[in-house]
């Protein structure tokens, strides 16, 4: 094992496989641009005409959730910090149950943009704040999702960096613009297939080389990588059972329950039953991808347990470990490294396409329609397509910015948690707290946002000490010292990032050691809870109890009981053929009057409330 290993490089077949994946995605876009009469209305374009069924939507939810950050980041996370990451399986279950049972209120209101809900429940100002936060957050995040994997893959495989960034951006924008949400959902289904295929090829080949899965598990066990049960309640430790269950649930519910790009998916289902079903089926997809990525991380450790490529300076960042492993073990199979790169990029494409479609939906519903209520459906459809092009270009521009940010990548990813938390708190106030009013909502949002930013930015400036992070040992004793002799290191210490090592010399205050060392999973939790509590306090003190609110905007016990009605009325709900009229969403009582004359209806509603 200790012999120097030369890793392979990309060959023509790898490029062919990668280009094939992009081509098929583009073809799906063209197909949906013309199939079934094309995208005639903005509802067709943004919501798939509300006629989608559960399975494709479920796979699409899985795909847009699993970006290339997952494909490249999770295995190296398991390699460095151990398999405790797999506790996320329980978190995913909780998140899906919460989204299906609590946040599916959006479905019965028949709205396109989740921020429409904020105006119905509070007022226009709250809606505008939510919309702007979402647009900023999504463009930031999407630029990073395009750029980060491109960089890691470029440094290991020599794949042309800007060629790939522009190609992915253009293809994505193309099929979003041509085919709307239907194309986004069906390309996602194809891309989940590619992701699982890429993962599986790595796991099978690694198991063959290492001598079976049992060897991989043994190596992991000997290296202390099977650290599933860490019940330390300390909120300052990066990953423990509790931080993952509690913090993880808040962080991911803010993405699943209230993020437009996810909600838009399940709102496009033809009935509420299909919408719930899609969420529960998607849970299986999340589990499959989690198991694959954790196994890949353990395979990484088994392969490099005595010669860590990161400490030995073969790769310059942990994200590059996975591509490094692929070129190491799959070099004799032309096309397979290409499949893996396609797998990482499928993650990117699906996340970016859902972001572009969601941004177009939010801009149309929240910024364009209220200003110009008289626009015809045809012009709205054209405008939606124009928005897709505009946001596609913005996201590619953001990727170019991300390349200049360098060290700020991590910061911008935390911003996702920092902004997501207060937004989720805002929606929770609306759905769960009957006496919350618009003053409380705005006050809570601002307070939650301020606290989130304080913790998040503090954690960036003063990174937590290694004993909080608990990285496991990485060894290099098996490396051949004559190989690559110039920049060879024998230490087993973690290479620190520059900011962390500079901060080491600063006198650390209790504030830095405690408040700023909070596990990153709790950023969202802090934001949500502060927003909820402050919002409730302000609402009670400003007469929130006196207002009269339509119970459709709240979570009621009927929402829970409706699960059991499905079984009584199963024949009616599932026999769609006998209900051709109700195809647009069988239980959408509010769809007609709220959607069609949205402006006067919402002013009436907010009028009664203020």
Image (spheres, rainbow, N blue to C red):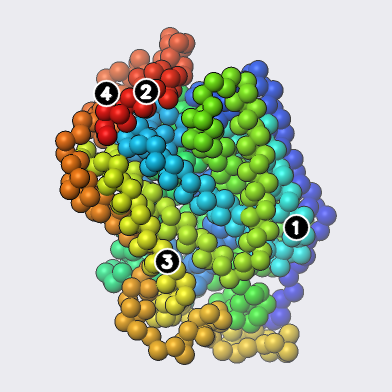
Distance (Cα) linking label 1 and label 2: 48 Å
Disc 4 is placed on an element classified as: helix
Is tag 1's residue or tag 3's residue first in the polypeptide sequence? 1
Q: Residue at x 59, y 42 (%)?
A: 356
Disc 1 is placed on an element classified as: helix
Q: Mark 4 highlights which residue?
A: 565
Q: From the viewer's perspective, is the residue at label 4 or at label 3 nearer?
A: 3
Q: Mark 3 highlights which residue?
A: 456
Q: From the viewer's perspective, is the residue at label 2 or at label 3 nearer?
A: 2
Is tag 1's residue or tag 2's residue first in the polypeptide sequence? 1
From the viewer's perspective, is 334 left or right of 63?
right
From the viewer's perspective, is 64 left or right of 339?
left
Mark 4 in CB contact with mark 3 (< 8 angstroms): no
Q: Position of residue 473 (x, y in %)?
A: 48, 81
Is tag 4's residue or tag 3's residue first in the polypeptide sequence? 3
Q: From the viewer's perspective, is the residue at label 4 or at label 2 nearer?
A: 2
Q: Quadrant of the N terminus?
A: bottom right
Q: Mark 1 highlights which residue?
A: 162
Distance (Cα) linking label 1 and label 3: 30 Å
Disc 3 is placed on an element classified as: helix
Q: Residues within 10 Å of mark 1 (few under 14, many from 20)?
A: some
Q: From the viewer's perspective, is the residue at label 1 or at label 3 nearer?
A: 3
Q: Mark 2 highlights which residue?
A: 601
């Amino acid at each position: 094992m200790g012999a120097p290993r030369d890793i392979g490089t990309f060959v023509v077949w790898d490029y062919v496989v990668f280009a094939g994946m992009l081509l098929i995605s583009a073809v799906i876009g063209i197909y949906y641009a013309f199939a079934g009469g094309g995208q005639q209305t903005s509802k067709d374009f943004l919501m798939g005409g509300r006629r989608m069924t559960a399975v494709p939507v479920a796979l699409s939810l899985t795909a847009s959730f699993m970006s290339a950050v997952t494909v490249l980041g999770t295995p190296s996370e398991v390699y460095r910090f151990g398999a405790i990451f797999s506790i996320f399986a329980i978190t995913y279950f909780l998140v899906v149950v919460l989204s299906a049972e609590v946040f599916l209120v959006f479905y019965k209101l028949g709205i396109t943009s989740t921020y429409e809900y904020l105006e119905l429940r509070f007022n226009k100002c709250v809606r505008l704040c939510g919309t702007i936060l979402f647009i900023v957050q999504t463009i930031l995040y999407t630029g990073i999702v395009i750029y980060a994997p491109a960089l890691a893959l470029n440094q290991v495989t020599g794949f042309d960096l800007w060629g790939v960034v522009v190609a992915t951006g253009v293809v994505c924008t193309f099929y979003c613009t041509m085919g709307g949400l239907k194309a986004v959902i069906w390309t996602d289904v194809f891309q989940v297939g590619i992701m699982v295929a890429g993962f599986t090829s790595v796991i099978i080949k690694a198991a063959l080389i290492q001598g079976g899965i049992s060897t991989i598990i043994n190596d992991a066990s000997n290296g202390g990588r099977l650290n599933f049960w860490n019940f330390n309640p300390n909120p300052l430790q990066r990953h423990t059972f509790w931080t993952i269950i509690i913090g993880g649930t808040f962080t991911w519910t803010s993405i699943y329950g209230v993020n437009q790009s996810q909600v838009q998916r399940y709102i496009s289902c033809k009935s509420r039953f299909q919408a719930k079903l899609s969420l529960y089926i998607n849970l299986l997809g999340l589990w499959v991808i989690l198991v694959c990525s954790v196994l890949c991380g353990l395979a990484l450790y088994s392969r490099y347990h005595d010669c860590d490529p990161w400490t030995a300076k073969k790769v310059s960042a942990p994200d590059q470990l996975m591509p490094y492993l692929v070129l190491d073990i799959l070099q004799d199979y032309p096309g397979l490294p290409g499949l893996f790169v396609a797998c990482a990029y499928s993650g990117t494409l699906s996340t970016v396409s859902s972001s572009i479609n969601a941004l177009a939906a939010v801009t149309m519903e929240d910024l364009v329609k209220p200003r110009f209520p008289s626009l015809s459906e045809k012009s709205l459809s054209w405008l939606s397509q124009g928005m897709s092009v505009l946001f596609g270009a913005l996201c590619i521009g953001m990727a170019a910015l991300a390349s200049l940010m360098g060290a700020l990548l991590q910061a911008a990813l935390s911003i996702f948690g920092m902004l997501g938390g207060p937004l989720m708190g805002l929606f929770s106030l609306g759905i769960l707290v009957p006496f919350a009013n618009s003053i409380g909502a705005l006050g809570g949002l601002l307070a939650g946002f301020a606290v989130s930013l304080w913790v998040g930015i503090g954690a960036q400036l003063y990174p937590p000490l290694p004993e909080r992070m608990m990285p496991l040992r990485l060894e290099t004793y098996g490396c051949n010292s004559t190989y690559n002799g110039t920049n060879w290191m024998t230490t087993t210490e973690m290479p620190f990032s520059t900011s962390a090592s500079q901060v080491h010399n600063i006198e650390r205050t209790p504030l830095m050691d405690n408040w700023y060392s909070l596990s990153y999973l709790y950023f969202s939790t802090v934001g949500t809870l502060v927003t909820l509590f402050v919002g409730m306090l302000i609402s009670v003190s400003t007469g929130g109890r006196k207002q009269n609110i339509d119970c459709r905007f709240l979570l009621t016990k009927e929402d829970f009981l409706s699960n059991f009605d499905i079984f009584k009325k199963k024949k009616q709900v599932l026999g769609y053929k006998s209900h051709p009229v109700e195809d647009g969403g069988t239980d959408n009582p509010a769809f007609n009057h709220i959607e069609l004359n949205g402006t006067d209806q919402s002013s009436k509603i907010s009028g009664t409330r203020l």
